Structure formats: C-alpha cells, structure tokens
Amino acid sequence: MRTNRIRTIAVAATALAAALSLTACGGEDKAMGTKPAGAVDTATPAATGTDDKAQSDAPKAGEPETQTVPAEGKHAGGNGNGKKPETAPNEKAAPSIPACTPKNSTVKVSSVSRPINHLLLTVTNTGTTDCAAYYAPFLRFDDAQAVYPVLDDSKPQAVVTLRPGQEAYAGISLLGEPGQNEPVKSDNLGVIMVDKNNESKGESTLKLPAETYTDSLGFVTYWQSDVENALMF
C-alpha cells in the first residue's frame, strides 16, 4: 500500500515537471519571437494589412510627392471635375474698337510756332460711335515712294480711343539738324490711317502750309491724346 502511494506521487511529480518544461519552452518561443510548429498567428491581421498599404502608398526616398486630386465638387474655385473653370458659353470676347478712317473721321494739318520745323496733325471722330486712332499715321509728302519715318519712342501706353467729336494728335518733325541733308519743298501730304493690324484703311490728301520743307531725317509720332505729347519730341 505504501509502495503504491509512493509510485503515484512519483508519477504525478513527473507529469508536473513535464508540464512546467513545456510552459517554459512556450514562453521562450514567445519572448524570442518564434512560434511553435503548427501554431496559428492571431496578431491583428487587419491592422497588418493597413500598415502594408500605407507603406506601399508612401513615397520612397528621393521620389517627389504627388498631390491627390480632390473629390468631385470639393476643390475651391473649380467646376467640380478637377479641371480649371472654363469660360461660360454665353461669355464672348469684347469686340475691338473700329479704326478711325476717312469714312468716320477727318484729318487736318496745321503749322505751329513751337517747336520750330514742326507741323501738327489732328484727326477728329465725325462718326456716331467710338473709333480708335491706332499706331501712327503713314505719311507721304508729294509723290514720295516711301512713307515718312515713325518715331518708336513716342508710342503711348494705350491706344487712343475717340468718342464722337473727340480729337487725337500726331507731331511731324520736318527737318533734322541744319546742314545734314538738303531740304525739299513739299506741297501736299498723304495721310494713311491704319487699323489694329497696322494695315491701311484709306488715305486722305491734305494741302500743306506754304513753304513746307522736309528732309529724310524727319519723323511722325504715334497718335497722342493731347497736343503737348504730340509736340514734345
């Protein structure tokens, strides 16, 4: 009887020792990050998948970041489709102002006391709507084949627009420095008005003031909104 009891205690001790041994091994496996053979990993697979996606979407070192286009209708100033706003179908470009021509305006030439050797050209809008004095007038003295030089430095900041009855002005320098060129007497002046493309829109022929002399060193200015600007060059 005593012998059987001793055997039972020994068997129980052996079983307890084996259980403790297995528990210790499992703890070491967990601490070392290893899994027993056949074990199933229960560590949040959904969270792991999210991290993987975030890592794949993140830009790699040295790669430029890309900007995500906002969802439809969300980005400010847009039209809801991620594109820049387009001009509304009923919006049209403002029409250009018609040029002042011999049909809607008159041109005259007059002498001035200052500066010397200058003439003043005046165009008046005689129509019922606005017209624009584009660029500079093309001038021809008598039967000259070439048009008179235009002074680029006289170009105004904006095209001169004339309401009905308003005037624009251009200064004409007749001569260069004395002795530089032989002056030629002229009797008539051809004035050609141009459009916004700098193309001829008709010519007016004017009688020049008596004793008008010109040479190849003179010039005409761009159209100006006032007399002072036309004669300052």
Image (cartoon, rainbow, N blue to C red):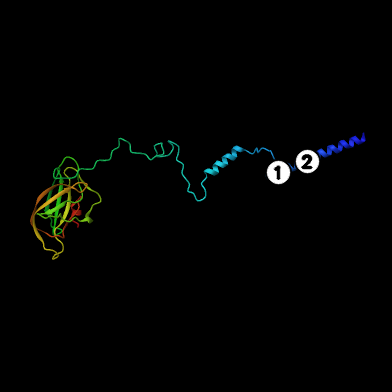
**Residue depicted at x 20% and y 54%:** 229
Say which amino acid is labelled 1: Asp
> Furthest-bottom residue in view?
179
Q: Position of residue 27 (x, y in %)?
A: 72, 42
Task: Provide residue 84's location: percent of width, then percent of height.
Answer: 38, 40
**In the rendered image, which residue does mark 1 sit on?**
29
Q: Quadrant of residue 74?
A: top left
Q: Would you place residue 146 above or below residue 99 in this image?
A: below
Instruction: Label 2: state its secondary structure.
Output: helix
For the residues bearing labels 2 and 1, Cβ distance under 8 angstroms: no
How many numbered marks have been drawn onto this rendered protein structure? 2
Residue placed most toward the observer, 113 or 170: 170
**Residue located farthest toward the right when viewing the structure as drawn:** 1
Q: Position of residue 55 (x, y in %)?
A: 55, 44
Question: Disc 2 to disc 1, how far (Cα)?
Answer: 14 Å
Closer to us: 17 or 179: 17
Instruction: Tell me which amino acid carries mark 2.
Output: Leu
Q: Quadrant of residue 114?
A: bottom left
Q: Residue at x 90, y 35 (%)?
A: 4
For residue 9, side relative to residue 72 (left or right): right
**Which badge, 2 or 1, comes first in the chain's sequence?**
2
Q: Is residue 132 left or right of residue 35?
A: left
In front: 36, or 69?
36
Residue 218 marker: none
Q: Which sits in the foreground, 7 or 50? A: 7
Judge the density around disc 2: few (<14), some (14-19), many (≥20) Cα neighbours within 10 Å: few
Mark 2 lies on residue: 20
Which quadrant of the rendered structure holds the C terminus? bottom left
What residue is at 84 percent from the left and 37 percent from the top?
Answer: 11
Q: Residue at x 10, y 49 (%)?
A: 205
Outermost top residue: 1
